Image (cartoon, rainbow, N blue to C red):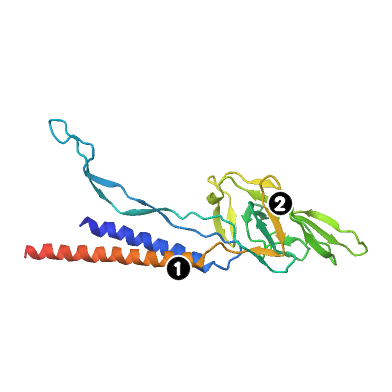
Amino acid sequence: MRALYTAATGMAAQELNVQVISNNIANMRTTGYKKQRAAFQDLIYDHVRRVGAQASDQGTIVPVGVDIGGGVKTVGTPRLMTQGTLSNTGNDLDIAIRGEGFFKIQMPDGTFTYTRDGSFTTDATGRIVTSAGNPVQPTITIPQAASGLTINAQGQVTVTVPGSTTPTLLGQIGLTRFINKTGLQPIGDNLFTETPASGAPQDGVANADGFGDMQQQNLEQANVEVVSEISDLIAAQRAYEMNAKVVSAADQMLQSTSNMFR
């Protein structure tokens, strides 16, 4: 019975939907996390009687066809790149992006990744790095014993060095954006890599040419809405249960048919 396979596709789809929702909820406290949603499409149809076909020799047309669907398939888990709320931390090296853009990070193999997680620190040489020790681009080194670290909205990093009362500009943290930021590939550790779908990276300066600005002593929180996720979870659970009920009903119908021939 075809209903068994159709309902099975529905159960598989809702199982994946729950997995996506659970990942969103698990990362509700992850800095810069962007939630995902599961997107579905119906499967190919078996056209038992095509709509619009000729119904008789007199040329009458079938007004309504007989189309039997094959179920549902998952076509993607797009990431929603909406702005998360900013949370003040009081840490001078915590930076939040308000608006468009990603921080550019250099990996140990020389390639670049991108992130919205601005929880930075310094390494043994004074470079501004991620929690994994990878330098933020362009590389900026804070001198030993420097004080008064300031990062303005444009990403300019200034400090006051010993023996001077005038702030010294060390460099400017850049931002990168993409034509299709939802096409970026997540690789874990709050990092993304470019793909053919995302388009080439466009490097620029914060607070200019459409880029967002930087907020020192702040971090961007995950854009996960707990109430919405719980609501979606309940709906997915109910959909799974209904598809399971279809499987059970179809099985009982097959048993009834089998008993007729005994």
Residue at which label 1 appears:
230
Q: Distance between the residues labelled 2 and 1?
A: 37 Å
State which quadrant residue 191 falls in. Answer: bottom right
Number of marks in picture: 2
Q: What residue type is labelled 1?
A: Ile
Crowding at mark 2 (Cα within 10 Å: few <14, some 14-19, many 20+): many
> Which corner quadrant holds the C terminus?
bottom left
Quick check: marks 2 and 1 in contact, CB under 8 Å?
A: no
Dot 2 falls on a residue whose secondary structure is loop
Q: Point out residue 77 in the picture as x, y percentages from the top left corner.
A: 46, 55
> Which corner quadrant holds the N terminus?
bottom left
* Rendered image: mark on residue 245: none
Residue at (70, 64) in percent of width and height: 94
Q: In this view, does 161 lie above or below 39?
A: below
Residue at (18, 66) in percent of width and height: 252
Residue at (20, 64) in percent of width and height: 251
Crowding at mark 1 (Cα within 10 Å: few <14, some 14-19, many 20+): some
User: Can the viewer see residue 107 in this picture?
Assistant: no
State which quadrant residue 124 falls in. Answer: bottom right
Q: What residue type is labelled 2?
A: Gly
Q: Which of marks 2 and 1 is nearer the N terminus?
A: 2
* Rendered image: mark on residue 174: 2
Residue at the top extreme of this rendering:
58
Dot 1 falls on a residue whose secondary structure is helix
Q: Point out residue 42 in the picture as x, y percentages from the top left corner.
A: 34, 51
Q: Point out residue 78 in the picture as x, y percentages from the top left corner.
A: 48, 54
Q: Is residue 80 left or right of residue 159?
A: left
Q: Which of marks 2 and 1 is in front?
A: 1
Task: Please name whichever residue, 147 or 62, is drawn nearer the observer in this view of the structure.
Answer: 62
User: Can the viewer see residue 215 in this picture?
Assistant: yes
Q: Point out residue 75 in the picture as x, y percentages from the top left corner.
A: 41, 51
Residue at the left extreme of this rendering:
262
